[in-house]
Amino acid sequence: MKKPLTGAELNELIAGLNKLSRNLWWCWNQEAQDLFQELSPRAWQHLFHNAVAVLREVSEYELRIHLQEPGFADRVRAVLKEFEGYLADQNTWCHKYAAKLHKNPVAYFSAEFGFHESLPISAGGLGILAGDHMKSASDLGLGLVGIGLFYREGYFQQAIDSNNWQTEYYNPVDPKNVPMEPVFDADGERLVCHVEIGMNTVAFRVWRVNVGRVPVFLLDTNLPENEQLFRDLTMRVYGGDSTTRIMQEILLGIGGVRLLRALGHEPSTFHMNEGHAAFLTLELIREKMAAGQTFAEAQTLTKAECIFTTHTPVEAGHDRFSRDLMNYAFQRFTTVLPVPFPEIKALGRVHPENLAEPFCMTVLALKLSRSANAVSELHGQVSREMWQSLYPGKTVDQVPIGHITNGIHLLGWMKGSVRQFWRKKLNNGNGETKFFREKFGEDWFAAVNHADFWEKMTDPAFVADEELWALRYKLRRELIEFARRKLLQQSQRATQGDFIRFDHFLNPDALTIGFARRFATYKRAPLIFQQFDNIVKLVHDKQRPVQFVFAGKAHPRDDDGKRFIQQIIHLSKNSELAGNVVFLENYDIHVARQMVAGCDIWLNNPRRPLEASGTSGMKASCHGCMGMSILDGWWREGYDGKNGFGIGPDSHPADVAEQDRVDSANLYQVLTEQVVPLFYNRDVNGIPREWIKRMRHAMATLVPQFTTDRMVKEYTNKYYLKK
Ligand SMILES: *Cc1c(COP(=O)(O)O)cnc(C)c1O
C-alpha cells in the first residue's frame, strides 16, 4: 500500500498545478493537458480547454482528494518536473548562440497574439504567427519579451442567422479565468503607466501571459480613472473606427515602450510585427531627445534599434491616417516631444513634401528600422516593388526589404493523438530508438523539429503504409464526428430528427477537402464552386466521392466576405451538395486544429500574389493532410512537384477576372486529374500506396522546414544579433 500524501506534499503539488495552469507551456504539452482534462472533462470541453478555468471549477478539497489517487499524483509530479526542468534549462540553442540577448532582450510588439482558444485576442493569421513566434522563442531559450493589448471582449464570436448572414457577438473575457496574471510594481501595487492620447493622459494596467519562458505583457486601459472612451479603447481587437485604431496603436507603441522602461527592461532590438506598433519609434526618439540628442541623432539611434516585419501586399492592410486624425490623436504627445509636429508627420509619407498624403504606419516603420523583411520570397519581391518609391535611386532589387518565410509552432499545432503516434514511434524500443537517443537524448522538442526525425518517420521501413493509413482514418473520423456535433449545435431548431440527419452528414470514407481561414475576399473561398455542375458530379460519384469542410470569419465590416460565407452556407443547405459540403461556425484555433488534422487535402486558392505567406497549410503536413494550392506565399517555396499538389504555374495573369477564370479551371483540373485518382487508387489490400508515398514525401520535406523553430533561428541570426 502506498502511503497517503502529507499535507505539505499536497500543498506543493497544488501550488505546482496552479503555477503550471498560468503558464501556456501546457498548451503544447499533451501530458499536462491530460491532467487538467481529467480533473473536469466538461469544464475542459466547454471552457475552451483552459487549465485555469478547470482549477477554478474544481474545489481545493476535491483536488486534494483526487491527488490521493497514487497514479494521478505520480503523473502530476512527472509533469511538474518536466515543466520546472524546461523553465530552468540553461542548455538551449540561445544559451549557445545568442546569449547576449538574455541581458538585452528583443522586445516584440504585436497588436494581436493567438496563443490558445481560451484567450481570443487574435483576428487571424498575423496573431497566430505572433503566438507561435513566442512559443518557439521560449523553446529556443531566446531573450525576448512580447508586448500586446488585452482586449477584454477579444475578437468576435461568429453566429449565422436565418439568412445565412454572419452576425457578431462578444464574450467578455474574465481575466481571472484565463492563463494570465496581473503585474505589480515594486511596492506590490498594481503597476499603472500613462500615455498621452488625444488631449488626455490615459492610464493603463498590465497583464502578464507566461508563454513558457517568454513573458508577454498585455496593456489594458480599463481603469476607473480613465474616461469611458479610453476605458473602452482596449475592448475589442481592431474594434471601432480609425480613431479607435490610431489610439490603440499609440497605446501599443508608445505605451509599450513606457512599460518596458517601468519594468526595467533594456531591449537591444524593438521588433515591430506589422506596422501597428510603429509609433514606438516616436517614443524612442522622445527618450533620446530628452537625454540631449538632436532630432537627427535620435532618428539615427532609433533606426539602429528597430526592425520591422511587413505582412501583407493588400493595400487596405497598411494603416493610413488623415492629417486631421494625426493632429487630433497627438495633441498632447506633441507637448512632450520637442519636434515640430509637421516633421513627425513627414516620417509617415513616401513624399514628405506632399501634405495631402496620409500618414502611413508602414512608411514610418520602414524609415525608422535598421532592417525590414517580408514573410515569403515572393512577398519579398512584391514588397520591394510596392515600396520602391520610398528609396529614390534604388532599383527594385536594391530596395532593402528581405524575407524570412513564416512557420508554425509544431508541437502547439500537432493534434494530441498524432503527437502520441509519433512519440510512441520514438520510444518503441527497436534499433531506431537508439539513433534518436544518441542524437537528441530525451529531448522530444528538439527531435520533432529536426529534419532527421521526419526523414526517419517517413521511411517505409520504420512506419508502414498501413499504420499511416490507419492514422489518417482515425483523424478523418475524429473530424467528421466533431463536425456533426458542431452542426447539431449550430442548427437553431435542432429536433430529434436533426440529430439523426447530421449523423448522415459527411462520409468517413470520402476524400475530404478543407478550407478555413479569414474570409478576406482575395482568399476566394467559393472559387471552387465556379465549376458548380462539375463539383456536384464529383460529390455524388459513388465510387470516388469528394466532400468539403469550410470555416472562417469575415471582418465585421466586410460585406463581400460575408456574402462569400452566405453563398457557401446556402449551397451547403439548399443545393445538391447538402450533406457533402458543410460550414463550421466560429472558426478559431480549436476548429483549425480539428480541420488541418482530419482533412486529406488543404485547399488554398488566393488571388496571387496577395497571400503574403499563409500558415494554415503548414499545420496540415504533420497530420498527413496534403496541400493543394496556388503557387503563392509559402507554397511557392515548399512545393517541389511531389509533396502535395500545385494549382497553375509560377505566374499569374494581370487581369483579375481572367485570373479567377484560369485559377478555377486549373483547380478543377488538378482535383479531377491528380488528386481524386491518386486517392482512390488502392491496391488489393485497399491501401492507396502512391497517395501515401506522396504524403511521406510531403512530411519529410515540409514539416521540419516550415516551423517557427527554423523561423525564429533565422530572425535571431539575420536580424536580432546584427546591428
Ligand atoms: C492558421 C490560422 C489562420 C491563418 O491561416 P491562413 O491560411 O494563413 O490564412 C487564421 N486563423 C486561425 C484560427 C488559424 O489557426
Image (tube, helix red, strand yellow):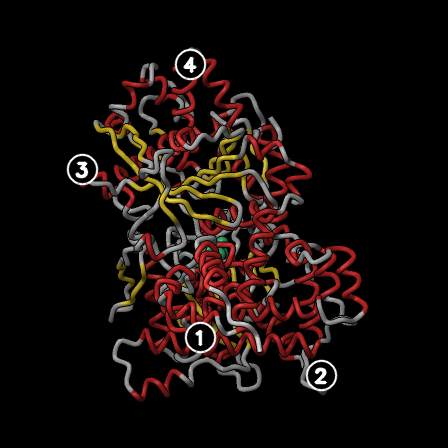
Badge 2: residue crowd in 10 Å (few <14, some 14–19, many ≥20) = few
Image-based side of 205 in relation to 394, left or right:
left
Badge 3: residue crowd in 10 Å (few <14, some 14–19, many ≥20) = some
Q: Residue at x 65, y 66 (%)?
A: 423
Image-based side of 319 in relation to 702, left or right:
left
Quadrant of the frame with the C terminus = top right
Image-based side of 718 in relation to 353, left or right:
right
Q: CA distance from mark 3 to mark 2?
A: 70 Å
Q: Is mark 4 within 8 Å of ligand 1?
A: no
Residue tagged by mark 2? 683
Which label is found at residue 482?
A: 1
The relative height of residue 64 versus residue 336 in the rendered view (above or below) is below
- CB atoms at circles 1 and 3 under 8 Å apart? no
Which label is found at residue 227?
A: 3
Query: Mark 4: which amino acid?
Result: Ala
Query: Mark 1: which amino acid?
Result: Phe
Badge 4: residue crowd in 10 Å (few <14, some 14–19, many ≥20) = few
Q: CA distance from mark 1 to mark 3?
A: 44 Å
**In what element is the residue under mark 3?**
loop
User: Residue 100's x, y, as percent?
Assistant: 61, 31
Query: Among all residues in the image, which is located at the extreme right?
Result: 431
Badge 1: residue crowd in 10 Å (few <14, some 14–19, many ≥20) = some
Front-lying residue, 97 or 409: 97
Front-lying residue, 115 or 265: 265
> Which quadrant would residue 18 be assigned to in this image?
bottom left
Q: Earlier in the sequence, mark 4 or mark 1?
A: 4
